[in-house]
Amino acid sequence: MASESVKRDWSIRDFEIGKPLGKGKFGRVYLAREAKSKYIVALKVIFKEQIEKYRLQHQLKREMAIQTSLRHPHVLRLYGWFHDAERIFLILEYAHGGELYGELRRSGHLSEKQAATYIASLTHALAYCHEKHVIHRDIKPENLLLDHEGRLKIADFGWSVQSKNKRHTMCGTLDYLAPEMVENKAHDYAVDNWTLGILCYEFLYGVPPFEADSQADTFRRIMKVDLTFPSTPHVSAEAKVLITQLLVKDSAKRLSLENILKHPWIIMNADPNGTFPK
Ligand SMILES: Cc1nn(C)cc1-c1nc2c(-c3cnn(Cc4ccccc4)c3)c(Cl)cnc2[nH]1
């Protein structure tokens, strides 16, 4: 597929469409197979009318440019794209293991080994993105997929930006947003470090740390960094230390991606291959 992905004239006739895999606000994703090579992909179908209605042409172009340019084992590949009169088609890597969120919902919470392995994978992927001046800004369980070996893949760069300096655009759902984003202030790469703290908490406790009955209450809890740890035997003190070092209001004082990978909890629990014994 990689060599063919440079083909310039893909069309829907090149693919055999299978079952629907999921749906987002602007379209659906289908399992598909490239007819000649039989290569399995995920085909994301986006309706132009929807993109035009919400004036998201630039965001979609940015998502496509960014995800096409990224090559990392924990970032879902965008092999290519094509369009017809009504639709835009993104030819994406197929993640055989499905949504990480499903695993979290089924089990209620993850083990420390699973959580640490996913956090380490995310940290490696974000370090790669940040080196290429890309801030994802919308890391949340729904955007995390698993390959056939259970390795994490970041999908949906719909809210990412190419950035060499501070950004101002508000985006995403509140639970995963850093204080500077919910206040719609200038923000930079460190927003992704904050989100790693949110995700680490949610992997271990099954819910995000600032969840509340209303967006206003979530907003208030984020701004106060109203962080509490339910008493439970399956979460170690080291994990709580890492979360506390990431959920810091001053973005400059959040633990760096480099130091996350050196953290005792990650060293002790993360599987270096990005998988872990079931
Ligand atoms: C679900 C599912 N179950 N199994 C066994 C595999 C999968 C699977 N899903 C995907 C998916 C996939 C599907 N939906 N979504 C969510 C979505 C949908 C539309 C717009 C934005 C985001 C992603 C992809 Cl891209 C890429 N690979 C995928 N693999």
Image (spheres, helix red, strand yellow):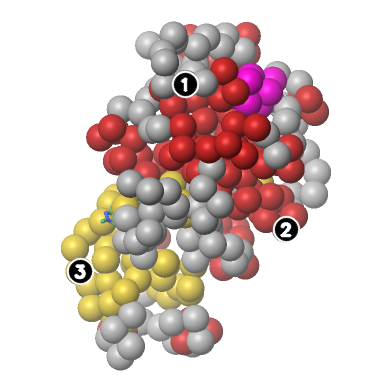
Residue flagged by tag 2: what amino acid is it? Lys
| Left or right: residue 29 compared with residue 273 | left
Seen from the viewer's position, the closer of residues 255 and 133 is: 255
Q: Residues within 10 Å of mark 1 (few under 14, many from 20)?
A: some
Can residue 115 be seen? yes
Which mark is on residue 235? 1
When asked about the image quadrant of residue 47, the answer is bottom left
Which portion, as a residue range, is magenta? 240-248
Q: Which residue is mark 2?
A: 132
- Picture coordinates of residue 147 (x, y %)? 39, 59
Q: How much space separates mark 3 and mark 2, taking CA atoms? A: 34 Å
- Picture coordinates of residue 33 (x, y %)? 28, 77
Q: Secondary structure at mark 2?
A: loop
Taking the image as four quarters, which one is ligand 1 found in? bottom left
Q: How much space separates mark 1 and mark 2, taking CA atoms? A: 34 Å
Q: Nearer the viewer, mark 1 or mark 3?
A: 1
Q: Which residue is mark 3?
A: 18
Is residue 60 within the magenta segment?
no
- Residue at 38% over, 11% down: 213
Residue flagged by tag 3: what amino acid is it? Gly
For residue 33, above or below residue 181: below
For residue 110, above or below residue 212: below
When asked about the image quadrant of residue 219, the answer is top right
Q: Secondary structure at mark 3?
A: strand
When asked about the image quadrant of residue 226, the answer is top right
Q: Secondary structure at mark 1?
A: loop
